Image (cartoon, grey):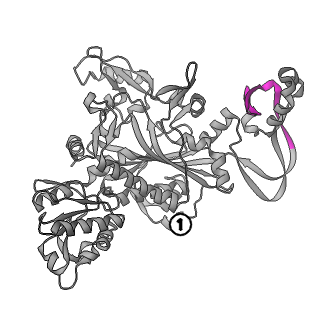
Amino acid sequence: MRMDPQELLSLCKRRGFLWPAYDIYGSVAGLYDYGPLGAALKNNIEDHWRRLYVQGEGFQEISCPIVAPEPVFKASGHVDAFSDMYVECTKCGETFRADHLAAGLHANPASLGEDELGKMLRESGVLCPECGGGLTAPKRFNLMFKTSIGAGRGKTAYLRPETAQGMFVNFSQVYRYGREKLPVGAVQIGRAFRNEISPRQGLIRLRELNMMEAELFVHPEDKSWPKFRDVRAEVVPLVPNKGPPSSVALEEAVKAGVIRNEVLAYFMWLTYKFALDIGLDPKRLRFRQHESTEMAHYASDCWDLEAEIGYGWTELVGVADRGCFDVKAHLDHSGADLTSFERYDEPREVEMEVVKPNFGALGPLFKDKSKLIAEALSKLPAEAAKDQDKVTVDVEGEALVVPSSCYEVSKRKEKVSGRKLVPHVIEPSYGVDRLLFSLLDHVYSKKDEYIVLRLKGLVAPIKVGVFPLMARDGLGEIATSIFDSLVKAGIAAYYDDSGSIGRRYARMDEIGTPCCVTVDYDTKSDGTVTVRDRDSAEQVRVKKEEVAEVVKALISGASFESLRSPQD
């Protein structure tokens, strides 16, 4: 049964997970602040992702600016194509995502053009959800936030709508740092910005969002993966765009061509493992393959990890084979050499395409710079100049546009020791905010009249609550010393001596704290404390000196039963 998202958002606001941004000024739709508990939960999710991708898989973490000049997004296609359709109410003036209003009228409304979508809404009698007024025809709206760099006639720029472009434009540096070998991967965790038309679903659709993205650069002719053999028997729930849903072994899905290649399959498994690690419910997860009408034109395969939450099935992660589109787009637009080099075992005689300068045209046009330009043209990969009206080359720090009359792409035979390749990209792209909200939805439960968040110790913002039974008779001092020892051991602890012990337990249960430690009068006589498990409410006595060790075991996944001594 789906829970009411507003009930969850109410808990998040009350307990300091999430707050509407700028609330004292009426707030802004699509913007949220993370409170103390939300920020800690978000950091724990991101830290585990780092452990898997940076430490486990060897990806390089980089951090790039959130603002970029217009040519970056012109090359990526965002300036021309990063848009959604909206309609406006002719009565109250409210705007709405047009495809959202068509939900239930078409299997994939976002795949329709303006005319098709407008006709569907009109013929279905769809009216303004706010006042019942009529709606305008759908119009396109670019979702990027536009700005400028510098004063006066500054350069046009945009806030990044994803973190990926920073990794694509830095491919040469990533490749060099990775000892000039493929595959090589980069990751980035950070903010992205999308000027959503009508965000109305909490953290599911935001104007400022958090992303964790990995870009794996692979050989275009080799998409095998050595570590795939370790997970080939793993089963994941698949909803292919052809055929019925199924849960099959990854090896079987690759052999049948349902999943396009081993690299894609491996990172789908890693994505699924990550989701289970942080505590999402496997019964409410699935990988849905993009329909042919929604698949990006450059992608050979793309799967979304979706979770069933109060808003329905919601995309959390996209795992795609993006081909060479991204790197080649920046190569073509910038003229930079964003290729990798494959070295042959022995030199080969090959016919290759090269960029040949036309000195007769270069001289009159560029005069004393013609020689330097000719050298720069000779170094360009043929792919950057072929079928282009012009290319841009860097000469002593100056970007010069060279028309095609000044060069030609010709063929010649050479003995070569290797060849240049434009790498393909496998991209797992994670929405942090959606993951966090879906996780809270999946772990939300009620016990009697109390709310319990059954967060795993791995991600719980607070790992343990520490309570003196009474704030007197020296119990507070003992509890404080235990609290201090936990903090020194690197464990996120919370001290509370206010209210009844039952109410204190309930407060910790409500924010997902896995266990609590209570100091009582027996502690003074025998040196033991009570450790209480959140999920079972069971208790066990342990020596106060062992509390940090016991708590670490519990938050690492040890069963509460394993803590009991034979006499218990």
- In percent of the image, x 52 and y 53: which residue is there? 264
Pick out the residue farthest to the right.
360
Q: Tell me where residue 58 sits by quadrant.
A: bottom right
Instruction: Looking at the picture, tell me which residue is in the foreground, 245 or 341.
Output: 341
Q: Which residues are magenta?
A: 387-412
- In percent of the image, x 20 and y 42: which residue is there? 10
**Residue 404 in view here:** yes
Q: Tell me where residue 169 sits by quadrant.
A: top right
Looking at the picture, which amino acid does disc 1 mark? Arg
- Residue 488 horizontal/vertical position (percent): 35, 65
> Total of numbered circles in the picture?
1
- In percent of the image, x 24 and y 25: which residue is there? 129
Q: Relative to 379, is 449 above or below? A: below
Pick out the residue farthest to the top.
91
- Residue 348 horizontal/vertical position (percent): 84, 54
**How would you classify the magenta stretch by its main secondary structure?**
strand
Q: Tell me where residue 96 sits by quadrant.
A: top left
- In percent of the image, x 67 and y 34: which residue is there? 334
- Residue 319 horizontal/vertical position (percent): 48, 48
Q: Relative to 515, is 173 above or below? A: above
* Residue 140 covered by magenta stretch: no
**Residue 387 in view here:** no
Residue at image mark 1: 229
* Residue 406 covered by magenta stretch: yes
Pick out the residue farthest to the bottom.
567
Q: Relative to 413, is 361 above or below? A: above
